[in-house]
C-alpha cells in the first residue's frame, strides 16, 4: 500500500521584509499565491527510512535526513511514537533552490502522506504546527490557495481570490541560498530605518477582485534588490519578459526564478516564447494560480 500527495509551488505576490529579529529570522508580510507546478510525494512502508527523487533537477536534492520530506516523516513519527520506516519518493517538478518553495512542498506532502498511511489522524492544527517547525514556507505549502503569512511567514490568514491569474516562470542556472539572500538584504539595508512589514490593501483588493491589472501594479518583493545584487543577470530576464508584454515581472521569493504576470493565456504563451528565445534563462514554464494545497491523490 502507498499514498501519493500532490503539492503546489508558490509565488510571493508581495514580500514585505522587516528588520532582522534576535533569532536571525525576519518578520514578514508575505502574500503567498500557490501556482500549478507540483511535486508529488509517494510514501510506502519499508524496512527503514529512505528517500529517492526523480525529475530534471533530482541530482540537486539531498537524499539523507536533511531532506524536508524525511524530516516531516520523522517529526510525525516522533510525536505519535511510531517507527518512521517508510520509503519516500519525490517526483520533482518544482525548480530546486528557485524561490518557489519546492523543498517546503515536499515537507508538507510527506507529512500529509505519512498521516494518511499511518492513520495518525493528526488535526489540521497539529499538521500546521509541524509544518512551522520544518520551515517558514511549509505551512503555506499545506494550505495552498492564497494566504497572508506574518511572523516569519508561518502564521497564515487565508485570502480570497476572485479569479485565475496567468503566470510565466523563468528558471535560472544554479540556485540562490535563501539565508544568503536575507543576509544580502541586511547588508543592503544597513543603517536604513526599516518600516514594520504590512500587507498592501490595494494588492489584497486586486486579489479578491481577480483584477490582473491592479495586481500587476501592486506586485512587490523586498528581497528583489538582494537577489539582483547576488545575481545581476536576472535584470536581463526581467527586461525581456516585460518587453514581451508581461504586465509585470519580479523575482519569486528569494530567487533566482523570475515570475511574470500576463493579461491572459495567449499573452503568457507570447511572453514564454520570447523568454525562451532570449537565452537569458534556463527553462520557462507557463501556469496559473491559485492552485489547491497538499492533496492526497
Ligand atoms: C523567501 C521565502 O521563500 C518567502 O516565502 C521565505 O521567507 C523563506 O522560507 P523558507 O525557505 O521556509 O525558510 P526557513 O527554512 O524557515 O529559513 C531559512 C533561512 O532563511 C532566513 N529567513 C527565513 C524566513 C524569514 N522570515 N526570515 C529569514 O531571515 C533565515 O536565515 C533562515 O535561517
Ligand atoms: N525535498 C527537497 N527538495 C529540494 N531541496 C531540498 C529538499 N529538502 C531539502 N532541500 C534543501 O533545501 C535547499 C533549498 O531548496 P528549495 O527547493 O526548497 O528552495 P527554494 O524553493 O528556494 O525555497 P524557498 O522558496 O522556500 O526559499 C536545497 O538546496 C536543498 O539543499
Image (spheres, grey):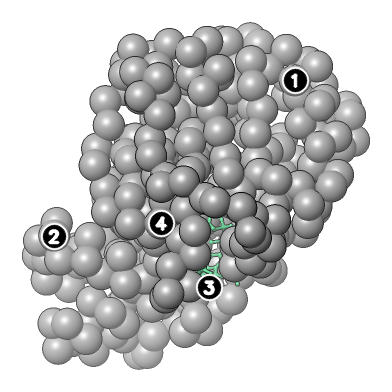
Residue drawn at x 54%, y 28% is 219
Query: Is the shortest distance between ligand 1 and the CB of mark 4 under 8 Å?
Result: yes
CA separation in Å, label 4 and label 2? 22 Å
Q: Which residue is mark 1?
A: 242
Mark 2 Cα shell of 10 Å, populated few (<14), some (14-19), many (≥20): few
Residue pointed to by mark 2: 125
Residue 22 to residue 237: above or below: below
Q: Is residue 217 left or right of residue 89?
A: right
For marks 1 and 4, give the CA distance: 30 Å
Image coordinates of residue 119 in percent, x first then y, are: 12, 69
Crowding around mark 3 (Cα neighbors within 10 Å: few <14, some 14 to 19, many 20+) is some
Residue 238 placed where, x, y %?
A: 76, 31
Q: Is residue 44 left or right of residue 274?
A: left
Residue 22 position, x and y percent, is 42, 74
Q: Which residue is mark 3?
A: 52
**Dot 1: within a 10 Å radius of its alpha carbon, few (fewer than 14), some, or many (20 or more) residues?**
many
C-alpha distance separating marks 3 and 1: 38 Å
CB atoms of marks 4 and 2 within 8 Å: no
Looking at the picture, tell me which residue is in the foreground, 135 or 201.
201
**Earlier residue among tags 3 and 4:** 4
Above or below for 227 versus 79 = above
Amino acid at each position: 500500500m502507498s499514498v501519493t500527495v500532490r503539492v503546489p509551488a508558490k509565488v510571493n505576490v508581495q514580500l514585505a521584509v522587516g528588520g532582522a529579529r534576535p533569532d536571525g529570522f525576519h518578520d514578514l508580510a508575505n502574500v503567498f499565491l500557490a501556482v500549478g507546478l507540483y511535486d508529488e510525494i509517494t510514501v510506502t512502508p519499508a524496512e527503514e527510512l529512505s528517500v529517492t527523487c526523480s525529475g530534471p533537477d533530482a541530482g540537486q536534492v539531498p537524499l539523507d535526513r536533511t531532506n524536508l520530506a524525511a524530516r516531516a516523516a520523522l517529526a510525525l513519527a516522533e510525536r505519535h511514537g511510531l517507527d518512521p520506516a517508510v520509503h519516500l519518493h519525490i517526483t520533482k517538478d518544482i525548480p530546486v533552490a528557485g524561490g518557489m518553495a519546492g523543498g517546503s512542498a515536499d515537507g508538507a506532502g510527506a507529512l500529509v502522506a505519512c498521516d494518511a498511511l499511518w492513520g495518525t489522524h493528526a488535526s489540521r492544527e497539529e499538521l500546521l504546527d509541524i509544518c512551522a517547525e520544518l520551515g517558514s514556507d511549509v505551512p503555506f505549502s499545506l494550505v495552498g490557495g492564497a494566504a497572508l503569512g506574518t511572523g516569519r511567514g508561518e502564521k497564515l490568514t487565508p485570502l480570497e481570490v476572485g479569479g485565475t491569474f496567468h503566470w510565466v516562470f523563468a528558471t535560472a542556472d544554479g540556485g540562490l541560498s535563501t539565508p544568503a539572500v536575507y543576509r544580502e538584504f541586511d547588508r543592503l539595508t544597513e543603517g536604513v530605518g526599516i518600516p514594520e512589514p504590512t500587507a498592501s490593501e490595494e494588492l489584497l483588493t486586486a486579489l479578491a477582485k481577480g483584477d490582473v491589472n491592479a495586481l500587476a501594479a501592486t506586485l512587490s518583493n523586498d528581497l528583489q534588490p538582494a537577489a539582483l545584487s547576488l545575481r545581476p543577470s536576472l535584470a536581463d530576464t526581467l527586461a525581456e519578459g516585460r518587453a514581451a508584454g508581461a504586465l509585470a515581472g519580479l523575482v519569486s521569493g528569494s530567487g533566482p526564478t523570475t515570475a511574470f504576470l500576463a493579461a491572459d493565456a495567449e499573452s503568457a504563451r507570447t511572453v514564454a516564447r520570447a523568454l525562451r528565445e532570449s537565452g537569458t534563462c534556463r527553462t520557462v514554464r507557463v501556469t496559473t494560480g491559485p492552485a489547491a494545497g497538499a492533496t492526497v491523490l
